[in-house]
Protein backbone atom coordinates (compact mmCIF):
# COMPACT_ATOMS: atom_id res chain seq x y z
CA UNK A 1 0.00 0.00 0.00
CA UNK A 2 1.52 3.27 -1.15
CA UNK A 3 0.20 6.70 -0.22
CA UNK A 4 1.22 10.36 -0.30
CA UNK A 5 0.96 12.29 2.98
CA UNK A 6 0.21 16.04 2.76
CA UNK A 7 -1.05 18.58 5.30
CA UNK A 8 -1.49 22.27 6.05
CA UNK A 9 -2.18 23.48 2.53
CA UNK A 10 -3.70 26.74 3.88
CA UNK A 11 -5.27 27.51 0.51
CA UNK A 12 -5.95 31.24 0.25
CA UNK A 13 -3.24 32.25 2.72
CA UNK A 14 -1.92 35.81 2.64
CA UNK A 15 1.61 36.35 3.98
CA UNK A 16 2.63 39.92 4.85
CA UNK A 17 0.09 41.28 2.39
CA UNK A 18 1.04 38.94 -0.47
CA UNK A 19 -1.57 36.43 -1.66
CA UNK A 20 -0.12 32.93 -2.02
CA UNK A 21 -2.68 31.56 -4.53
CA UNK A 22 -0.31 31.54 -7.52
CA UNK A 23 2.42 29.92 -5.42
CA UNK A 24 -0.06 27.30 -4.21
CA UNK A 25 -1.29 26.60 -7.75
CA UNK A 26 2.34 26.06 -8.82
CA UNK A 27 3.08 23.64 -5.97
CA UNK A 28 -0.23 21.75 -6.47
CA UNK A 29 0.77 21.06 -10.08
CA UNK A 30 3.96 19.42 -8.80
CA UNK A 31 1.97 17.27 -6.39
CA UNK A 32 -0.42 16.12 -9.14
CA UNK A 33 2.52 15.30 -11.42
CA UNK A 34 4.11 13.31 -8.59
CA UNK A 35 0.87 11.32 -8.23
CA UNK A 36 0.86 10.60 -11.96
CA UNK A 37 4.46 9.37 -11.89
CA UNK A 38 4.58 7.57 -8.53
CA UNK A 39 1.04 6.15 -8.78
CA UNK A 40 0.21 5.93 -5.06
CA UNK A 41 -3.00 4.21 -3.98
CA UNK A 42 -4.10 7.21 -1.93
CA UNK A 43 -3.40 10.86 -1.13
CA UNK A 44 -3.92 11.86 2.51
CA UNK A 45 -4.45 15.52 3.46
CA UNK A 46 -4.21 15.95 7.22
CA UNK A 47 -6.13 19.15 7.81
CA UNK A 48 -5.93 22.93 7.43
CA UNK A 49 -7.02 22.67 3.84
CA UNK A 50 -7.98 26.35 3.89
CA UNK A 51 -6.38 29.18 5.82
CA UNK A 52 -9.63 30.38 7.34
CA UNK A 53 -13.07 28.96 8.11
CA UNK A 54 -14.75 31.04 5.40
CA UNK A 55 -12.31 30.90 2.47
CA UNK A 56 -12.43 33.36 -0.39
CA UNK A 57 -13.97 32.36 -3.71
CA UNK A 58 -10.52 32.18 -5.38
CA UNK A 59 -9.30 29.77 -2.72
CA UNK A 60 -12.34 27.51 -3.16
CA UNK A 61 -11.87 27.48 -6.95
CA UNK A 62 -8.17 26.61 -6.62
CA UNK A 63 -8.81 23.73 -4.22
CA UNK A 64 -11.62 22.47 -6.45
CA UNK A 65 -9.15 22.42 -9.37
CA UNK A 66 -6.61 20.55 -7.23
CA UNK A 67 -9.12 17.89 -6.15
CA UNK A 68 -10.38 17.51 -9.72
CA UNK A 69 -6.84 17.02 -11.05
CA UNK A 70 -6.15 14.42 -8.35
CA UNK A 71 -9.42 12.61 -9.07
CA UNK A 72 -8.57 12.40 -12.76
CA UNK A 73 -5.45 10.37 -11.91
CA UNK A 74 -7.69 7.70 -10.34
CA UNK A 75 -6.10 8.02 -6.89
CA UNK A 76 -8.20 7.78 -3.71
CA UNK A 77 -8.17 11.07 -1.78
CA UNK A 78 -8.86 11.30 1.96
CA UNK A 79 -8.82 14.50 3.96
CA UNK A 80 -9.78 15.70 7.42
CA UNK A 81 -10.54 19.18 8.68
CA UNK A 82 -8.01 21.15 10.71
CA UNK A 83 -8.32 23.92 13.26
CA UNK A 84 -8.36 26.54 10.47
CA UNK A 85 -11.17 24.84 8.54
CA UNK A 86 -14.95 25.00 8.79
CA UNK A 87 -15.88 21.31 9.26
CA UNK A 88 -19.34 21.72 7.72
CA UNK A 89 -18.11 23.59 4.65
CA UNK A 90 -15.32 21.08 4.10
CA UNK A 91 -17.80 18.19 4.31
CA UNK A 92 -20.14 19.63 1.66
CA UNK A 93 -21.28 16.88 -0.77
CA UNK A 94 -18.94 14.40 0.95
CA UNK A 95 -21.36 11.44 0.65
CA UNK A 96 -21.80 12.04 -3.07
CA UNK A 97 -18.07 12.43 -3.66
CA UNK A 98 -17.25 9.04 -2.14
CA UNK A 99 -18.38 7.50 -5.43
CA UNK A 100 -15.36 9.30 -6.95
CA UNK A 101 -13.14 7.98 -4.15
CA UNK A 102 -12.96 11.42 -2.51
CA UNK A 103 -13.42 11.13 1.25
CA UNK A 104 -13.92 14.59 2.76
CA UNK A 105 -14.16 14.13 6.52
CA UNK A 106 -14.82 17.54 8.02
CA UNK A 107 -17.32 16.73 10.75
CA UNK A 108 -17.12 13.97 13.33
CA UNK A 109 -20.03 11.66 13.97
CA UNK A 110 -19.44 9.03 16.61
CA UNK A 111 -16.38 6.89 15.83
CA UNK A 112 -13.69 7.90 13.31
CA UNK A 113 -14.46 7.12 9.68
CA UNK A 114 -12.68 3.99 8.42
CA UNK A 115 -11.78 3.81 4.71
CA UNK A 116 -10.46 0.33 3.82
CA UNK A 117 -8.16 -0.20 0.84
CA UNK A 118 -6.74 -3.56 -0.15
CA UNK A 119 -3.49 -4.77 -1.68
CA UNK A 120 -1.71 -8.10 -2.08
CA UNK A 121 -1.26 -8.34 1.72
CA UNK A 122 -4.91 -7.69 2.58
CA UNK A 123 -6.76 -4.62 3.88
CA UNK A 124 -5.35 -1.39 5.24
CA UNK A 125 -7.83 0.67 7.27
CA UNK A 126 -7.38 4.44 7.07
CA UNK A 127 -8.96 6.08 10.14
CA UNK A 128 -10.01 9.70 9.48
CA UNK A 129 -10.06 11.95 12.56
CA UNK A 130 -11.03 15.61 12.03
CA UNK A 131 -9.71 18.22 14.45
CA UNK A 132 -11.47 18.04 17.83
CA UNK A 133 -11.55 20.11 20.99
CA UNK A 134 -12.68 18.96 24.46
CA UNK A 135 -15.64 21.35 24.17
CA UNK A 136 -16.84 19.48 21.07
CA UNK A 137 -17.33 16.31 23.09
CA UNK A 138 -18.72 17.99 26.20
CA UNK A 139 -21.57 19.25 24.00
CA UNK A 140 -21.86 15.95 22.11
CA UNK A 141 -25.30 14.43 22.60
CA UNK A 142 -24.02 10.87 22.91
CA UNK A 143 -20.80 11.52 24.84
CA UNK A 144 -22.33 10.89 28.25
CA UNK A 145 -24.19 7.81 27.03
CA UNK A 146 -21.16 6.14 25.45
CA UNK A 147 -18.42 7.35 27.75
CA UNK A 148 -19.94 8.30 31.07
CA UNK A 149 -16.83 6.92 32.76
CA UNK A 150 -14.61 9.48 30.98
CA UNK A 151 -14.25 12.98 32.37
CA UNK A 152 -13.33 15.04 29.30
CA UNK A 153 -11.16 18.00 30.27
CA UNK A 154 -8.07 17.88 28.04
CA UNK A 155 -7.34 17.34 24.36
CA UNK A 156 -5.90 13.96 25.35
CA UNK A 157 -9.22 13.02 26.99
CA UNK A 158 -11.19 14.14 23.94
CA UNK A 159 -9.05 12.29 21.41
CA UNK A 160 -8.95 9.18 23.57
CA UNK A 161 -12.75 9.23 23.91
CA UNK A 162 -13.30 9.42 20.14
CA UNK A 163 -10.61 6.87 19.36
CA UNK A 164 -12.11 4.41 21.84
CA UNK A 165 -15.36 4.43 19.86
CA UNK A 166 -13.58 2.74 16.96
CA UNK A 167 -13.24 -1.03 16.89
CA UNK A 168 -9.58 -1.07 15.83
CA UNK A 169 -7.81 -4.37 15.38
CA UNK A 170 -4.19 -3.41 15.92
CA UNK A 171 -2.99 -6.82 14.74
CA UNK A 172 -3.93 -5.66 11.24
CA UNK A 173 -2.54 -2.67 9.29
CA UNK A 174 -3.97 0.70 10.32
CA UNK A 175 -3.22 4.28 9.27
CA UNK A 176 -4.38 7.35 11.21
CA UNK A 177 -5.09 10.69 9.49
CA UNK A 178 -5.36 13.42 12.11
CA UNK A 179 -4.89 17.14 12.66
CA UNK A 180 -3.91 17.52 16.32
CA UNK A 181 -0.84 18.63 18.23
CA UNK A 182 0.93 15.39 19.12
CA UNK A 183 4.22 15.49 21.03
CA UNK A 184 6.74 12.96 22.27
CA UNK A 185 7.83 13.22 25.89
CA UNK A 186 11.14 15.03 26.31
CA UNK A 187 11.35 16.18 22.68
CA UNK A 188 10.61 19.77 21.67
CA UNK A 189 8.88 19.90 18.27
CA UNK A 190 10.05 22.23 15.52
CA UNK A 191 7.65 25.17 15.37
CA UNK A 192 6.99 27.80 12.72
CA UNK A 193 5.89 31.40 13.24
CA UNK A 194 2.98 30.74 10.85
CA UNK A 195 1.26 28.27 13.21
CA UNK A 196 -1.31 28.95 15.89
CA UNK A 197 0.47 28.40 19.22
CA UNK A 198 -1.97 27.98 22.11
CA UNK A 199 -0.78 29.27 25.46
CA UNK A 200 1.24 26.73 27.42
CA UNK A 201 0.74 23.92 24.91
CA UNK A 202 -2.69 23.15 26.32
CA UNK A 203 -3.65 21.34 23.10
CA UNK A 204 -0.72 18.91 23.27
CA UNK A 205 -1.47 15.16 23.19
CA UNK A 206 1.11 12.52 24.09
CA UNK A 207 1.88 10.52 20.96
CA UNK A 208 1.86 7.28 22.97
CA UNK A 209 -1.91 7.36 22.46
CA UNK A 210 -1.47 6.59 18.75
CA UNK A 211 1.58 4.33 18.92
CA UNK A 212 -0.44 1.30 17.80
CA UNK A 213 -0.96 2.63 14.28
CA UNK A 214 1.34 1.43 11.51
CA UNK A 215 1.55 5.04 10.34
CA UNK A 216 0.11 8.29 11.71
CA UNK A 217 -0.32 10.97 9.03
CA UNK A 218 -0.41 14.19 11.04
CA UNK A 219 -1.10 17.82 10.28
CA UNK A 220 -0.75 21.00 12.38
CA UNK A 221 2.99 21.75 12.53
CA UNK A 222 4.39 23.40 9.41
CA UNK A 223 7.85 21.82 9.52
CA UNK A 224 8.05 18.18 8.41
CA UNK A 225 9.22 16.00 11.29
CA UNK A 226 8.70 12.75 13.14
CA UNK A 227 7.12 12.54 16.60
CA UNK A 228 9.25 10.13 18.59
CA UNK A 229 9.31 7.36 16.00
CA UNK A 230 9.56 7.55 12.22
CA UNK A 231 6.03 6.27 11.54
CA UNK A 232 4.35 9.13 13.45
CA UNK A 233 4.93 12.18 11.29
CA UNK A 234 3.90 15.73 10.45
CA UNK A 235 4.01 16.27 6.69
CA UNK A 236 4.57 20.01 7.13
CA UNK A 237 3.13 22.69 4.87
CA UNK A 238 4.00 22.41 1.16
CA UNK A 239 5.10 26.06 1.09
CA UNK A 240 6.99 28.35 3.47
CA UNK A 241 4.56 30.68 5.17
CA UNK A 242 6.99 32.52 7.45
CA UNK A 243 10.64 33.52 7.51
CA UNK A 244 11.25 31.17 10.42
CA UNK A 245 11.44 28.45 7.74
CA UNK A 246 13.50 30.26 5.12
CA UNK A 247 16.53 27.95 5.41
CA UNK A 248 14.46 24.73 5.24
CA UNK A 249 13.52 22.79 2.12
CA UNK A 250 9.89 21.71 1.67
CA UNK A 251 8.93 18.11 0.92
CA UNK A 252 5.98 15.76 0.52
CA UNK A 253 5.99 12.40 2.27
CA UNK A 254 5.57 9.16 0.33
CA UNK A 255 4.83 6.10 2.48
CA UNK A 256 4.72 2.44 1.52
CA UNK A 257 3.38 -0.24 3.86
CA UNK A 258 3.93 -3.83 2.88
CA UNK A 259 3.46 -6.57 5.49
CA UNK A 260 2.64 -5.57 9.06
CA UNK A 261 5.58 -3.59 10.47
CA UNK A 262 7.30 -3.08 7.11
CA UNK A 263 7.05 0.66 6.42
CA UNK A 264 9.18 2.78 4.08
CA UNK A 265 9.07 6.58 4.26
CA UNK A 266 10.52 8.82 1.55
CA UNK A 267 10.68 12.63 1.49
CA UNK A 268 10.15 13.96 -2.04
CA UNK A 269 11.28 17.55 -2.78
CA UNK A 270 8.91 20.41 -3.55
CA UNK A 271 10.32 23.42 -5.40
CA UNK A 272 8.48 26.74 -5.00
CA UNK A 273 7.83 29.11 -7.87
CA UNK A 274 9.43 31.85 -5.78
CA UNK A 275 11.31 31.02 -2.58
CA UNK A 276 11.33 32.84 0.75
CA UNK A 277 14.71 34.16 1.90
CA UNK A 278 16.55 36.72 4.03
CA UNK A 279 19.17 39.13 2.70
CA UNK A 280 21.42 41.30 4.85
CA UNK A 281 23.85 44.13 4.12
CA UNK A 282 24.26 47.77 3.21
CA UNK A 283 21.56 49.04 0.87
CA UNK A 284 24.07 50.00 -1.83
CA UNK A 285 25.43 46.45 -1.85
CA UNK A 286 21.99 44.82 -1.88
CA UNK A 287 20.95 46.97 -4.85
CA UNK A 288 24.05 46.15 -6.87
CA UNK A 289 23.01 44.12 -9.91
CA UNK A 290 25.77 41.56 -9.27
CA UNK A 291 24.13 40.82 -5.91
CA UNK A 292 20.54 40.97 -7.15
CA UNK A 293 21.29 38.52 -9.96
CA UNK A 294 22.64 35.89 -7.57
CA UNK A 295 19.07 34.79 -6.78
CA UNK A 296 15.53 35.14 -8.04
CA UNK A 297 14.67 38.82 -7.69
CA UNK A 298 11.00 37.81 -7.38
CA UNK A 299 11.60 35.71 -4.25
CA UNK A 300 9.79 36.76 -1.08
CA UNK A 301 12.37 38.76 0.83
CA UNK A 302 13.04 39.90 4.38
CA UNK A 303 15.71 42.62 4.35
CA UNK A 304 18.13 43.38 7.18
CA UNK A 305 19.86 46.72 6.53
CA UNK A 306 23.20 47.35 8.22
CA UNK A 307 23.67 51.01 7.16
CA UNK A 308 24.44 53.29 10.10
CA UNK A 309 23.23 56.40 8.28
CA UNK A 310 19.57 57.31 7.86
CA UNK A 311 18.04 56.13 4.56
CA UNK A 312 15.08 57.91 2.99
CA UNK A 313 12.33 55.53 1.77
CA UNK A 314 14.48 52.37 2.03
CA UNK A 315 11.51 50.07 1.27
CA UNK A 316 10.79 51.81 -2.05
CA UNK A 317 14.45 51.60 -3.04
CA UNK A 318 14.71 47.91 -2.17
CA UNK A 319 11.39 47.04 -3.78
CA UNK A 320 12.58 48.49 -7.10
CA UNK A 321 15.12 45.64 -7.21
CA UNK A 322 13.18 42.99 -5.27
CA UNK A 323 9.44 43.44 -6.04
CA UNK A 324 8.32 40.89 -3.42
CA UNK A 325 9.96 42.42 -0.36
CA UNK A 326 7.74 41.47 2.58
CA UNK A 327 9.48 43.06 5.55
CA UNK A 328 12.52 45.03 6.62
CA UNK A 329 14.52 45.74 9.76
CA UNK A 330 17.73 47.50 10.72
CA UNK A 331 20.73 45.92 12.40
CA UNK A 332 23.25 48.65 13.03
CA UNK A 333 24.87 50.56 15.87
CA UNK A 334 21.90 52.90 16.16
CA UNK A 335 19.25 50.17 16.39
CA UNK A 336 21.36 48.16 18.83
CA UNK A 337 21.81 51.20 21.05
CA UNK A 338 18.06 51.88 21.00
CA UNK A 339 17.37 48.30 22.00
CA UNK A 340 20.00 48.33 24.76
CA UNK A 341 18.56 51.55 26.19
CA UNK A 342 15.02 50.15 26.14
CA UNK A 343 15.86 46.80 27.72
CA UNK A 344 15.54 46.53 31.51
CA UNK A 345 18.66 45.42 33.35
CA UNK A 346 19.22 42.33 35.46
CA UNK A 347 16.22 41.05 37.34
CA UNK A 348 14.06 43.85 35.98
CA UNK A 349 13.45 41.77 32.87
CA UNK A 350 11.62 39.07 34.83
CA UNK A 351 9.55 41.75 36.56
CA UNK A 352 8.47 43.41 33.32
CA UNK A 353 4.86 42.97 32.27
CA UNK A 354 3.96 41.15 29.01
CA UNK A 355 2.89 44.52 27.59
CA UNK A 356 6.27 46.11 28.42
CA UNK A 357 8.17 43.20 26.93
CA UNK A 358 6.15 43.36 23.72
CA UNK A 359 6.63 47.14 23.54
CA UNK A 360 10.40 46.65 23.75
CA UNK A 361 10.26 43.90 21.11
CA UNK A 362 8.24 46.15 18.79
CA UNK A 363 10.70 49.02 19.30
CA UNK A 364 13.68 46.78 18.49
CA UNK A 365 12.33 45.49 15.20
CA UNK A 366 10.49 48.56 13.91
CA UNK A 367 12.69 51.31 15.28
CA UNK A 368 9.65 53.19 16.61
CA UNK A 369 7.17 52.98 19.43
CA UNK A 370 3.66 51.56 18.98
CA UNK A 371 0.89 53.94 17.99
CA UNK A 372 -2.07 54.50 20.32
CA UNK A 373 -4.18 52.15 18.20
CA UNK A 374 -1.54 49.40 18.20
CA UNK A 375 -1.04 49.82 21.93
CA UNK A 376 -4.79 49.47 22.55
CA UNK A 377 -5.02 46.31 20.42
CA UNK A 378 -2.10 44.66 22.24
CA UNK A 379 -3.61 45.48 25.65
CA UNK A 380 -7.00 44.09 24.59
CA UNK A 381 -5.39 40.85 23.34
CA UNK A 382 -3.43 40.46 26.56
CA UNK A 383 -6.52 41.04 28.66
CA UNK A 384 -8.46 38.50 26.59
CA UNK A 385 -5.70 35.94 27.09
CA UNK A 386 -4.88 35.68 23.37
CA UNK A 387 -1.24 36.70 23.91
CA UNK A 388 0.90 35.49 26.77
Image (spheres, rainbow, N blue to C red):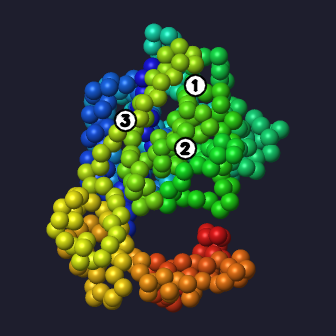
Picture coordinates of residue 59 (x, y %)?
A: 33, 53
Q: Which residue has dot 2 on it?
A: 179
Q: Which is nearer the N-term, disc 3 or disc 2?
A: 2
- Viewer-proximal residue among 230 and 39: 230
The quarter of the image holding the C terminus is bottom right
Q: Which mark is residue 198?
A: none
Q: Which residue has dot 3 on it?
A: 268
C-alpha distance separating marks 1 and 3: 20 Å
Mark 1, Cα crowd under 10 Å, few <14 / some 14-19 / many 20+, is many
Picture coordinates of residue 269 (x, y %)?
A: 35, 39
Residue 316 visible (yes or no): yes
Picture coordinates of residue 193 (x, y %)?
A: 49, 60
Mark 2, Cα crowd under 10 Å, few <14 / some 14-19 / many 20+, is many
SS state under label 3: strand
Q: Which residue has dot 1 on it?
A: 214
Of badges 1 and 3, nearer the viewer stands 3
Tell me what residue is drawn at x 45 percent, y 13 percent: 119
Mark 3, Cα crowd under 10 Å, few <14 / some 14-19 / many 20+, is few
Of badges 3 and 2, nearer the viewer stands 3
The quarter of the image holding the N terminus is top left
Residue 93 visible (yes or no): no
C-alpha distance separating marks 2 and 1: 17 Å
Tell me what residue is drawn at x 64 percent, y 84 percent: 344
Quadrant housing residue 125: top right
C-alpha distance separating marks 3 and 2: 21 Å
User: Is 90 on the left-hand or right-hand side of 185?
Assistant: left
Quadrant housing residue 166: top right
Amino acid sequence: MKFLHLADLHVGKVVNGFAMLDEQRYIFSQIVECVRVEKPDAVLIAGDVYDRPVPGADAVVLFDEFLTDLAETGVTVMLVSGNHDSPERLSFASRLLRDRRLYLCGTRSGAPLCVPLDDEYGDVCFWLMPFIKPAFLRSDADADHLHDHIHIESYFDAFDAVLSRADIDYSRRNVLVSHQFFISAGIDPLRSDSEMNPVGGLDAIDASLISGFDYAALGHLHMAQKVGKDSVRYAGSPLKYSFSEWRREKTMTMVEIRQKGDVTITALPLKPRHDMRVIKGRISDLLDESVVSQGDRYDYIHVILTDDSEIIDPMDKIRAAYPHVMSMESDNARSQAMFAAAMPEGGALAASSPYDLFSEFFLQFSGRAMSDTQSRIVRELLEAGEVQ
